[in-house]
């Protein structure tokens, strides 16, 4: 196997074997604690600009398939694993992880001590790095890692936006399965009052399982690019507005923040991940960069209203600064690992958000009630005029 090297901006070098595509990439080196779901992680647009390390020791053992993707292609900069399985064994598999990465031009490295790397990131924080199969000179690679631009202050959303608006109309029967129903056969169903509400989803890098769940809850979903103006959103005559996940630092996204600010109070609003941060910023809060972020399908969150603990899927490197919260917002959820803000709701308007991913792809299903909560808010708004 060809040699690959990972260089960190602080001078640490990791030598391993190349898999996937040959090449050289830079990005912020982060880690994800999920045991499975690597294909969903690869295709999550929120990973734009990041080199992702998987903490679980073996990846690729169940192969890849066209049904588990969260967007049309992988978006991360590079992929780091302890062991890339030489055999994929699953009746749903259409090919190997190695071939999938190569097909999409994603540089991977295997055979390094990922435990050492993750412990280093936990201690020193996520940092810039370079992953290369071309340049193997340590001094050169370290210089390139130091020059990597990082995530702070960059608008990565514009790199993953959908080109146009579209109606969400997928054959959901072959995609993600909800445990309550076993399929999506009752998708876009009217409720007992005949309501079949219309939601505009502002796409900042949205995972596809989100509109699947919105559709399952009975919504007709129109997806607009996250750069859409207030006028463009309201032209669609929505009954509710959804704010999606997406990559990078939320504070440079002035266009999104202003649009959300203008839309507050006009329709019920629900935000996830980056959408949660943008909702907070639109209300007057601030965000900050986490030391090493929250990425994995096993993050505990406390619902302050019910007292229940939910195990959640998360992927973010920024968070809402609690000290900056305006009086109009109250905290509904907390991350139990570091006590950061994991959920907000407006005290006067039908608007709320969470920092985690209730669509659970890949991950637990504890938080799917939030889609039902959004449905109830939209239907209540329609019923009450």
Image (cartoon, rainbow, N blue to C red):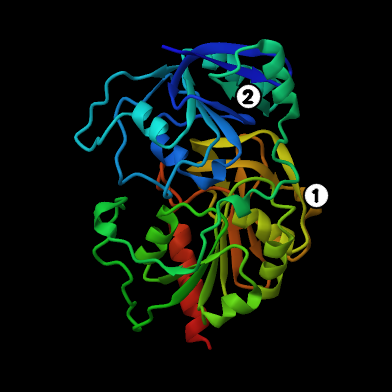
Q: Position of residue 209 (x, y in %)?
A: 40, 53
Q: Quadrant of residue 129?
A: top right
Query: Which corner quadrant holds the N terminus?
Result: top left
Q: Position of residue 101 (x, y in %)?
A: 41, 32
> Considering the numbered disc 2 on the image, is that residue within a helix, a strand or a loop?
strand
Task: Name the residue rendered at 48%, 24% in the picture.
Answer: 22
* Residue picked out by circle 2: 130
Measure the alpha-carbon separation of dots 1 and 2. Answer: 35 Å
Task: Name the residue rendered at 75%, 25% in the picture.
Answer: 146
Is residue 343 something one can see in this rendering? no
47 relative position to 85: left or right? right
Q: Nearer the viewer, residue 351 or 255?
A: 255
* Residue picked out by circle 1: 323
> Considering the numbered disc 1 on the image, is that residue within a helix, a strand or a loop?
helix
Q: Is residue 101 above or below residue 372?
A: above
Q: Say few, some or many: other residues with alpha carbon within 10 Å of mark 2 (under 14 / 14 to 19 / 20 or more).
A: many
Q: Is residue 5 above or below residue 279?
A: above
Label ID, residue 129: none
Q: Nearer the viewer, residue 138 or 46?
A: 138
**Do callouts 1 and 2 mark residues in contact (Cβ within 8 Å)?**
no
Q: Is residue 302 above or below residue 185?
A: above
Q: Quadrant of residue 266?
A: bottom right
Q: Position of residue 203 (x, y in %)?
A: 54, 60
Q: Residue furthest front?
A: 134
Q: Position of residue 372 (x, y in %)?
A: 43, 64
Q: Say few, some or many: other residues with alpha carbon within 10 Å of mark 1 (under 14 / 14 to 19 / 20 or more).
A: few
Marks 1 and 2, the one that precedes in the sequence: 2
Q: Is residue 132 above or below residue 234?
A: above
Task: Name the residue rendered at 52%, 74% in the picture.
Answer: 240
Q: Residue furthest bottom?
A: 385
């Amino acid at each position: 196997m060809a040699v690959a090297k990972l260089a960190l901006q602080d001078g640490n070098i990791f030598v391993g074997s190349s898999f996937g595509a040959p090449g050289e990439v830079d990005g912020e080196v982060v880690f994800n604690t999920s045991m499975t779901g690597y294909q969903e992680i690869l295709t999550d647009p929120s990973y734009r600009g990041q080199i992702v390390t998987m903490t679980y020791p073996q990846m690729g053992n169940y192969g890849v398939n066209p049904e588990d993707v969260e967007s049309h292609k992988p978006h991360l900069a590079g992929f780091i694993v302890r062991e890339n399985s030489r055999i994929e064994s699953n009746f749903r598999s259409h090919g190997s992880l190695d071939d999938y990465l190569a097909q999409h031009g994603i540089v991977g490295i295997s055979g390094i001590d990922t435990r050492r790397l993750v412990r280093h990131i936990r201690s020193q924080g996520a940092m810039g790095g370079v992953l290369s199969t071309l340049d193997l000179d340590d001094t050169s690679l370290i210089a390139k890692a130091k020059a990597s631009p990082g995530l702070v202050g960059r608008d990565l959303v514009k790199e993953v936006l959908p080109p146009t608006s579209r109606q969400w109309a997928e054959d959901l029967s072959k995609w993600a399965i909800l445990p309550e129903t076993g399929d999506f056969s009752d998708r876009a169903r009217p409720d007992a009052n005949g309501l079949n509400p219309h939601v505009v989803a502002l796409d900042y890098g949205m995972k596809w399982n989100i509109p699947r769940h919105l559709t399952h809850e009975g919504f007709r979903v129109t997806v607009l690019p996250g750069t859409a103006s207030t006028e463009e959103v309201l032209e669609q005559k929505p009954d509710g507005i959804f704010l999606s996940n997406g990559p990078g630092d939320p504070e440079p996204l002035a266009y999104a923040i202003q649009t959300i600010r203008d839309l507050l109070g006009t329709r019920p609003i629900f935000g996830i991940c980056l959408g949660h941060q943008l909702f907070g910023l639109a209300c007057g809060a601030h965000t900050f960069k986490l030391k090493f972020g929250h990425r994995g399908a096993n993050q505990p969150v406390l619902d302050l209203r019910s007292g229940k603990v939910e195990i959640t899927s998360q992927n973010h490197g920024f968070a809402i600064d609690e000290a900056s919260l305006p009086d109009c917002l109250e905290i509904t959820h907390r991350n139990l690992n570091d006590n950061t803000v994991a959920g907000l709701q407006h005290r006067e308007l039908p608007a709320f958000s969470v920092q985690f991913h209730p669509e659970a792809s890949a991950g637990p299903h504890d938080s799917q009630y939030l889609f039902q909560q959004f449905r109830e808010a939209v239907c209540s708004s329609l019923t009450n005029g």
